[in-house]
Amino acid sequence: MTTRTPRVGVLALQGDFREHLLVLRELGADAVPVRRESELDQVAGLVIPGGESTVMDKLCRLYGLRDPLRGRIAAGMPVYGTCAGLIMLADRITDAIDGQETLGGLDVTVQRNAFGNQNDSFETDLDIPELGEAPVHAVFIRAPAVSDLGDGTTALAALEDGRVVAVEQGNLLGTSFHPEVTDDYRFHERFLERVRAA
């Protein structure tokens, strides 16, 4: 018997939020798009999708979501960020555009577009013991990489060259890649476990 998951949201200002909603609903979650503070107030956890982190930052401010999001993250709400979502959760970013800000919470430094442009997208298998024996097939699209981890942050996965591409800190989870475009939902399941436990 599975415990019912409280309502979770996907930040739906920009990016591939629809794919995350489909995955979460397939896993049995009550998943809703979040575009306003009133919608954020109704969810117990949030996914920040891939997309364009600079645009996402501007839209968070425009829609009055930046400060409420920062408050919920600081208060311990489980959040999972993929690709641009990882950038949004990082305390520090390199290669940012002028004026770009993040929501913060993850004690990491993230490099934007660490692997190049769209043409440099790639796929690989990652060994992630925390998710079981089977490797995770990871899809990287204009992906960031974690260049520095704070004391409280755990690296869950790294490429052969040592670049960290999945991290965890308390109720926060971040990946450089896009599990929502594969049929491996273990990261989303890990996020939902955090929501149920919170």
Image: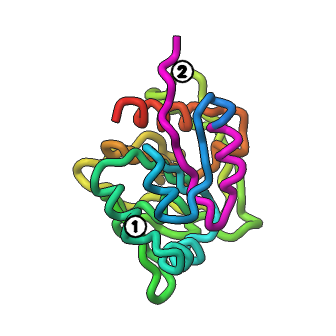
Residue 30 percent coordinates (x, y):
59, 37
Local SS, label 2: loop
Disc 2 residue type (three-letter): Glu
- Per the model, the C-alpha gap separating discs 1 and 2 is 33 Å
Which residue is at a point 38% across and 44% down the rendered structure image? 168
Residue 133, disc: 2
- Residue lying farthest to the left in this orientation: 151
Residue 21 or 175: which is nearer the viewer? 21
Local SS, label 1: loop
- Residue lying farthest to the top in this orientation: 1
Residue 91 lies, with reference to residue 26, above or below; the image says: below
Q: Is residue 22 magenta?
A: yes
Residue 115 or 45: which is nearer the viewer? 45
Residue 136 percent coordinates (x, y):
61, 34
Residue 103, disc: 1
How many numbered marks have been drawn onto this rendered protein structure? 2
- Colouring style: rainbow
Q: Which residues are magenta?
A: 1-24
